[in-house]
Image (cartoon, grey):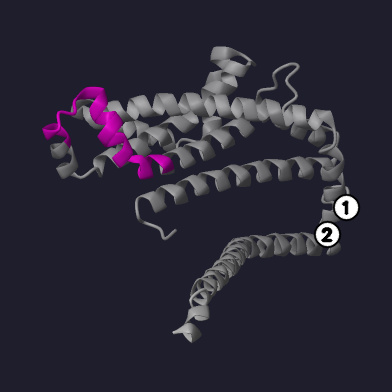
Amino acid sequence: MPTDAPAAPAAPAAAERNAAADRVTGLDALELGGATDRERLAARFWRSAWPKLLAVAIVIAAWQAVVLAELKPAYVLPGPAEVFDELGAIVTTGEFWDAVRLTMTRAVIGFLLAVVIGTVVGAAVATFAPLRAAIGSLITGLQTMPSIIWFPLAILLFQLSESAIMFVVIIGAAPSVANGLISGIDYVPRTWLRVGQVLGMRGIARYRHLILPASLPSFVSGLKQGWAFSWRSLMAGELLVIVPGALSIGVRLQSARELNEAALLIAWIIVVLLIGILIDVLFNAADNNLRRRWGLKQP
């Protein structure tokens, strides 16, 4: 009996050592897990980035090959190095950011107005069958029309002003937004509508809590297409409708052409392209997030 007495305190000590070891092991696992998550994120980023980088490299290589072949004089088609030097020089100036701010302000305001108008018209057409019969085809017809067609009318109505540009931006984007919403509402399952009716959803509440959320994937696609139309309309408008004192991206492009500054002209074209790509990335991120929420895409 006396020989067994000293062994009693050893059990708690051993348990404490085991617990400490478990804690250390857990910390190691967390550290390894964090590293694994970072590696997984880096791998996803690289999988997404390398095709784009490869495409850019191919375009620049083809561009340089055309320049080296001297198919056009250097003052008409400068090489990538000269253009990128010009681009690096203009982005450090206040005039560049003033032009980008003015153009993006027009783009955002015009697009938001188009979203409001397109949403109201789309909801009305999708709800009332006589209205769809009357103007449903008209909306699709407006969507297919080139935006430049509207500028003579816009200038006649609003002269050379901001309103003329906004008119064309809105009429170019609103039909796409309306058609996206109409398509989304058309594909809402009838069962869901009956369930909403049983739950007492009527009027605005029915749209807010049932129809609009159910039609959201198609509506987002319509918004993306509407942005593309509004952006193209805006660029055409800034080239055609020169508002005094408004030195936008389009005015800078026109000025570079008139002064025969080819490198500066191409640099501004690259700016327009980069803005379009950035907005497309934002729309794709919103679309992917929506698809994950709907269980259509793995997290």
Question: What residue sits 37% from the left and 33% below the top?
Answer: 178
**Quarter assignment of residue 231:** top right
Q: Is residue 173 left or right of residue 239?
A: left
Label 2, residues with CA under 10 Å away: few <14, some 14-19, many ≥20: some
Is residue 25 placed above or below 193 in the rendered structure? Answer: below
Main SS type for the magenta part? helix
Q: Which mark is residue 235?
A: none
| 46 vs 123, nearest the viewer | 46
Q: Quadrant of the N terminus?
A: bottom left
Residue furthest to the front: 2
Mark yes or no: residue 156 visible: yes
Question: What residue sits 80% from the left and 65% below the top?
Answer: 65
- Residue stretch rendered in magenta on the structure: 196-220
Question: What residue sits 71% from the left and 64% below the top?
Answer: 58
Q: Is residue 217 left or right of residue 72?
A: left
The residue singled out by tag 2 in the image is: 67
Question: What residue sits 48% from the left and 76% below the top?
Answer: 8
Give me the C-alpha separation between circle 2 and circle 1: 7 Å
Label 1, residues with CA under 10 Å away: few <14, some 14-19, many ≥20: few
Spot occupied by residue 69 in the image (x, y as percentages of width and height) = 83, 64
Residue 12 located within the stretch drawn in magenta: no
Spot occupied by residue 170 in the image (x, y as percentages of width and height) = 49, 26
**Circle 2/circle 1 CB separation < 8 Å:** yes
Of helix, strand and loop, which one carries label 1? loop
The residue singled out by tag 1 in the image is: 74
Residue furthest to the left: 198
Is residue 209 placed above or below 214 in the rendered structure? Answer: above
